[in-house]
Amino acid sequence: MPDPSEGLLLCNRFILRRRLGQGGMGEVWLASDKALEDQVALKILKPSLAVSADGIRLLREECRHSRRLTHPSIVRIYDFHSHETHHFISMEYVPGTDFRRFVGSPPMECLPKLLPVIDALEYSHAQGFIHRDIKTSNIL
């Protein structure tokens, strides 16, 4: 199975449009959902982790736990999917930029924008969920 690339069709449903970012576990792609005629984000497990039962299990658990979180400042998680050698999570697509654009800005400019993030972290911690990868590129 080819690496994720623009135009790749997964599960006869999701068409990859453009890569939004990458992290330790894989890549996040903007995709068109043919079934719902909408845009979604897909977190696709790295090929090196996709051959490991532990890697797949970790992604499935992330999906299962994240689906319990319902908060206006937390991206909604939809489902876990497998297609041949690709394993991925479908989730809400949030257009815009990430928090990296505020690096170096005066604190009073970014502080009001961080308050919803703090609220979301407090909520998720109360639910027993710890993000473990808070960084500017993960804050939209």
Image (cartoon, grey):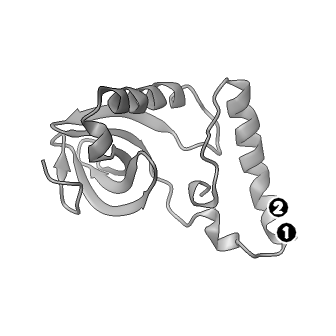
- Say what secondary structure mark 2 lies in: helix
* Neighbourhood count class around disc 2 (C-alpha, 10 Å): few under 14, some 14–19, many 20 upward: few
Q: How many marks?
A: 2
Q: Is residue 122 left or right of residue 107?
A: left
Quadrant in the picture for residue 102: bottom right
Q: Residue 2 at what x, y percent from top left?
A: 14, 53
Amino acid residing under circle 1: Pro
Rendered image: mark on residue 111: 2
> Does 35 sit above or below residue 109?
above
Q: CA distance from mark 1 to mark 2?
A: 6 Å
- Report the residue at 36% width, 33% height from top: 55
- Report the residue at 46% width, 25% height from top: 64
Quadrant in the picture for residue 129: top right
Quadrant in the picture for residue 128: top right
> Is the C terminus in the top left, top right, bottom left or bottom right quadrant?
bottom right
> Does 104 sit above or below residue 43?
below
Q: Residue 99 at what x, y percent from top left?
A: 64, 64
> Does 97 sit above or below residue 105?
above
**Residue tagged 1:** 107
